[in-house]
Amino acid sequence: MGQPLRVGIVGVGAISGQYLSTFARLEAVRPGAVRVVAVADLDATRAAAVAAEQDVRALTVDELTTDPEVDLVLNLTIPAAHAEIALKAIAAGKDVYGEKPLAATLEDARAVLEAGRAAGVRVGCAPDTVLGTGVQTARAAIDGGAIGEPVAATATMMTPGHERWHPNPDFYYQPGGGPLLDMGPYYVTTLVTLLGPVASVVGTASHTRTTRTIGSGSRQGEVIPVDVDTHVTGVLRHESGALSTLVMSFDSVATRASEIEVHGQTGSLIVPDPNRFDGDVQLHELGGAWRTLPPSAGYRDAARGYGVVDLATTPPGTPARANGDLAYHVLDIMTSLLASAGSGTGVAVESTCERPAAVPLSDMPLSDMPLSDMPLSDMPLSDMPLSDAPS
């Protein structure tokens, strides 16, 4: 069967449980394919508890990123730590895969990609929600001509803010946070998956409050500062010519708008929540009525961690779907949008990327290629304070 891909996880906060659950499912389907061998966290007590539960080793971050028994570092730390952890792992010859965004700044993200290429290792990054049946069925409909030539899309995320439920929400309101950099990767990655890379953006942004009050946990009632814009809106011009309108807000109460809609000359699509892997895709053809499309593409019953497995089973020389170049382009789009909001002018997006390969309708990504034949070098990174990543 070949050697397993040995994974070390940095940051074992809430989101790590979803990855561990996915890897456990994989172990039941194909024993020894992917194996978690170590964990690390700034909270040594938490790392020890997860290590005992998973029957793996608890290490320090430095120990894990250099451990010879770790092939891939799964980085589930806060955005501000993404680049630091990734560069440590790459310097030790490890593949890296992590939660979004690729890094807190475009400069840091570029350094990660350049280091990965120089070291000959793979860099991957969430979100992998786009690999599920929801987004992939919508993509199949678009590619199959169901809406004709795509003209426009809308992407909307409106919430009151995460401090209501998150016990440690500080990083959402610090540089590198905010609704666009926090939730935007799900929406922008979906838009790129559906309509291709983005050439230019124009945007504006604001914030209604300079402080927020924590609503749950041991710090309930504590007031924290807001150092980023909390309502961002803009228009993305795709290289294809299609226009996507984006609204990301922590300043609203609720909305009845679809998370994502895509409109073409002969039809319109409602795309399910890009923070999920599944959901109904609805199509309205010219002269017809709304109808739900059956799943026709994507990984069935997918969950966080499928991007890691997809990378592990991607043949040598072929880009994995949740790859670093895509994540870099998405970050470039978002930072360009914030730059446009600050300057009041349109901004060209300097990077581009290949539209990721479509996912045929299938179960867990397990290729027939023996794992021992796969190069252990080209993986991703994540998103939580060396311990506390958001969902």
Image (tube, rainbow, N blue to C red):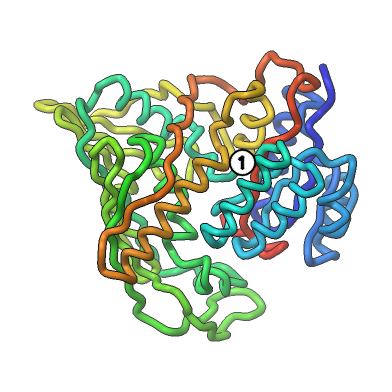
In percent of width and height, residue 208 lies at 34, 79
Q: Amino acid at mark 1?
A: Gly
Residue at 62 percent across and 53 percent down: it is 111
In percent of width and height, residue 214 lies at 54, 78
Screen quadrant of the C terminus: bottom right
Residue at 57 percent across and 52 percent down: it is 110
Residue 20 sits in which quadrant? Answer: top right
Q: Is residue 309 above or below residue 152?
A: above
Question: Which residue position is annotated with label 1?
Answer: 124
Q: Is residue 223 above or below residue 255?
A: below
Residue 77 versus residue 111: which sits nearer the camera? Answer: 111
Q: Which residue is the extreme one toward the left?
A: 287
Q: How many marks?
A: 1
Residue at 38 percent across and 64 percent down: it is 338
Does residue 243 appear in the picture of this structure?
A: yes
Residue 18 versus residue 77: which sits nearer the camera? Answer: 77
In percent of width and height, residue 215 lies at 53, 76
- Mark 1 secondary-structure assignment: strand
Q: Say whether residue 165 is left or right of residue 217.
A: left
Q: Is residue 229 above or below residue 308?
A: below
Q: Say whether residue 122 is left or right of residue 255.
A: right
Q: Which residue is the extreme one toward the top?
A: 368
Residue 159 versus residue 128: which sits nearer the camera? Answer: 128
